[in-house]
């Protein structure tokens, strides 16, 4: 770190190389989807939670398993269901007959990377426990607050088509996700490579992460996050971020706009993207690249546009085109 408090060139170079290695090893398991992998790596660098949305079978769970393997640390997976209780995630107190005392049995949330599969299937009480963990980095068991060891990150998945038996995530919880990332169908060549890789000398449907190497430790990831947080961002770009978010609140067709937390999230994501790209400073392009993933789950379209089939990304493209970026 230099005298200004910014990350030194050596720190930036090392952190960028580590993120590049992380991206490369995850790509060995997840065929195609390079943008999705990049955005996931950006979220790790920025220390933010991710909401993954895509059709069944496009690699959501595989992506998170590959990331967890590459980063190391403690990994937990929770399948969210309508009967899932908060204690199923956080843990609970049990009475020890030998010591005649209550002791706490910690649940799967005590980890470094939590995969929440189909998170929108859990009821409100369980979502409340998740909200506390995501925002406060702690959980409460029998009235006692227990800190979650950093890094603690949530990658949650949801299916965009099957809504029966689901509970829409409260906006307060959606706002805690740094990014909402869409995973679409792969291209024809990518799907061919995927099928070849998944069926060659393999039996059954087990997710294959054998080629993924551990390239980071949790401690390494924390150091990368500190470098990203100190990456240089000019005041003009900071003002550009605020202009974008404020413009979204009054943009035609957006009924409910993003709050100030969106501006903070966009700054963090832009810094993460700049570092993953090997740069020691943030550019307007970093902001533009991450804007849709940061804002799409923080805006609500007017009812008539939703009926006509518009999506938040359609209006966000117009927003990015309509708000002037600072010149380099």
Image (cartoon, helix red, strand yellow):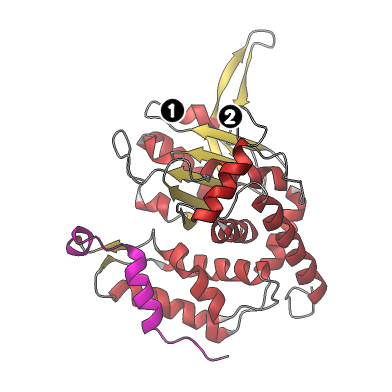
Image: magenta residue range = 304-327
Residue 141 visible in the snapshot: no
> Label 1 crowding class (10 Å Cα cut-off): few <14, some 14-19, many 20+?
some
Q: Position of residue 185 (x, y in %)?
A: 45, 52
Q: Is residue 15 above or below residue 66?
A: below
Q: Position of residue 92 (x, y in %)?
A: 54, 24
* The magenta stretch spans residue 232: no
* Quarter of the figure with the C terminus: bottom right
Is 12 on the left-hand or right-hand side of 129? right
Give the quarter of the image for residue 112: top right
Q: Position of residue 93 (x, y in %)?
A: 56, 22
Is 86 on the left-hand or right-hand side of 267? left
Residue at (59% x, 80% y) in the render? 283
Is 262 on the left-hand or right-hand side of 238? left
Residue pointed to by mark 1: 85
Earlier sequence position, callout 1 versus callout 2? 1
Q: Considering depth in this image, is 206 or 160 the residue closer to the camera?
A: 206
* Quarter of the figure with the N terminus: bottom right
Q: Position of residue 274 (x, y in %)?
A: 63, 72
- Classified by dominant secondary structure, the portion drawn in magenta counts as helix
Residue at (51% x, 88% y) in the render? 326
Residue that sits furthest to the right in the current view: 10
Disc number for residue 107: 2
Residue that sits furthest to the bottom in the current view: 327
Q: Considering depth in this image, is 5 or 111 the residue closer to the camera?
A: 111
């Amino acid at each position: 770190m230099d005298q200004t408090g910014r990350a030194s060139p050596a720190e930036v170079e090392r952190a960028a190389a580590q993120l590049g290695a992380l991206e490369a090893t995850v790509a060995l398991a997840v065929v195609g989807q390079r943008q999705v992998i990049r955005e996931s790596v950006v979220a790790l660098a920025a220390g933010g939670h991710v909401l993954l949305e895509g059709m069944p079978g496009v690699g959501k769970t595989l992506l998170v398993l590959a990331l967890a393997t590459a980063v190391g640390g403690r990994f937990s997976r929770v399948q969210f269901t309508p009967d899932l209780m908060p204690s199923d995630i956080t843990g609970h107190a049990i009475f020890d007959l030998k010591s005649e005392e209550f002791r706490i049995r910690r649940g799967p949330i005590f980890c470094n990377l939590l995969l929440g599969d189909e998170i929108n299937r859990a009821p409100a009480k369980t979502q409340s426990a998740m909200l506390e963990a995501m925002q406060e980095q702690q959980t409460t068991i029998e009235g006692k607050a227990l800190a979650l060891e950093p890094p603690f990150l949530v990658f949650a998945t949801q299916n965009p088509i099957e809504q029966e038996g689901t509970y829409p995530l409260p906006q307060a919880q959606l706002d805690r996700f740094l990014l909402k990332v869409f995973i679409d169908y792969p291209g024809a060549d990518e799907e061919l490579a995927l099928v070849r890789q998944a069926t060659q000398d393999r039996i059954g449907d087990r997710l294959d992460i054998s080629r993924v190497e551990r390239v980071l430790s949790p401690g390494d990831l924390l150091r990368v996050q500190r470098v990203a947080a100190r990456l240089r961002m000019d005041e003009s770009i900071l003002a550009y971020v605020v202009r974008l978010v404020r413009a979204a609140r009054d943009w035609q067709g957006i009924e409910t706009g993003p709050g100030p937390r969106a501006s903070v999230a966009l700054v963090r994501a832009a810094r993460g993207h700049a570092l993953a790209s090997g740069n020691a400073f943030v550019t307007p392009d970093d902001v533009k690249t991450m804007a849709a993933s940061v804002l799409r789950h923080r805006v609500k379209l007017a009812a008539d546009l939703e009926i006509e089939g518009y999506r938040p990304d359609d209006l966000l493209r117009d927003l990015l085109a309509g708000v002037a970026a600072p010149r380099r």
